[in-house]
C-alpha cells in the first residue's frame, strides 16, 4: 500500500452508551480512530427490494491496518456516515478494505 494513494481522511466510529442529564442511557458514536485512506470506488446501485426500488451509494476505502475494527462500527468520510458492510484484510495485516453503504 503506497502512502501517496492514501489521500483521504476517514474516521472509524463505535457505538457507545452514555448517560444524559436525567441519567437515561443514550447511544452515541465515539471516534475510535482517524486514518488516511484511499477511496477506491463509489457508485449508486439500485436494489430491488420487497417494498420497491431504492438507491444506495456504495463506497470502498483502503486503509492501513488497525486492530479491533468490526462491521458494527461505522466510517465517516467528508461529513457522510457509511455503514461498514464488509471488511477485507489486505496481505498479512497490512491494511483493510472497507466496503460500505452510505446512510440514507
Image (spheres, helix red, strand yellow):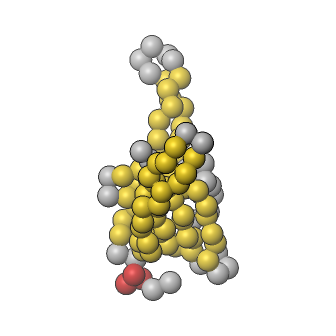
- The C terminus: image quadrant: top left
Would residue 17 be visible to someone looking at this image?
Answer: yes
Q: Residue at x 51, y 18 (%)?
A: 24
Q: Is residue 38 left or right of residue 85?
A: left
Residue 104, placed above or below residue 65? above
Q: Is residue 41 left or right of residue 66?
A: left
Residue farthest to the top, as pictured: 22
Q: Residue at x 45, y 86 (%)?
A: 2
All told, the count of numbered labels is 0
Residue 63 x %, y %: 49, 71
* Picture quadrant where residue 96 is located: bottom right
Residue 101 x %, y %: 49, 55
Q: Is residue 10 left or right of residue 51?
A: left
Q: Is residue 43 left or right of residue 86?
A: left
Residue farthest to the right, as pictured: 92
Residue 26 x %, y %: 49, 26
Q: Residue at x 47, y 60 (%)?
A: 45
Would residue 37 be visible to someone looking at this image?
Answer: no
Near-viewer residue (20 or 55): 55
Q: Residue at x 49, y 68 (%)?
A: 60
Residue 20, placed above or below residue 3? above
Near-viewer residue (55 or 99): 55
Residue 52 x %, y %: 52, 43
Near-viewer residue (54 or 84): 54
Amino acid at each position: 500500500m503506497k502512502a501517496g494513494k492514501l489521500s483521504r481522511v476517514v474516521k472509524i466510529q463505535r457505538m457507545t452508551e452514555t448517560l444524559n442529564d436525567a441519567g437515561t442511557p443514550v447511544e452515541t458514536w465515539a471516534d475510535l480512530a482517524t486514518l488516511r485512506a484511499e477511496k477506491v470506488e463509489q457508485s449508486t446501485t439500485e436494489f430491488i427490494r420487497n417494498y420497491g426500488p431504492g438507491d444506495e451509494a456504495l463506497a470502498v476505502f483502503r486503509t492501513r491496518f488497525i486492530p479491533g475494527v468490526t462491521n458494527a462500527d461505522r466510517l465517516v468520510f467528508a461529513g457522510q456516515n457509511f455503514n461498514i458492510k464488509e471488511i477485507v484484510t489486505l496481505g498479512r495485516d497490512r491494511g483493510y478494505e472497507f466496503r460500505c453503504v452510505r446512510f440514507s
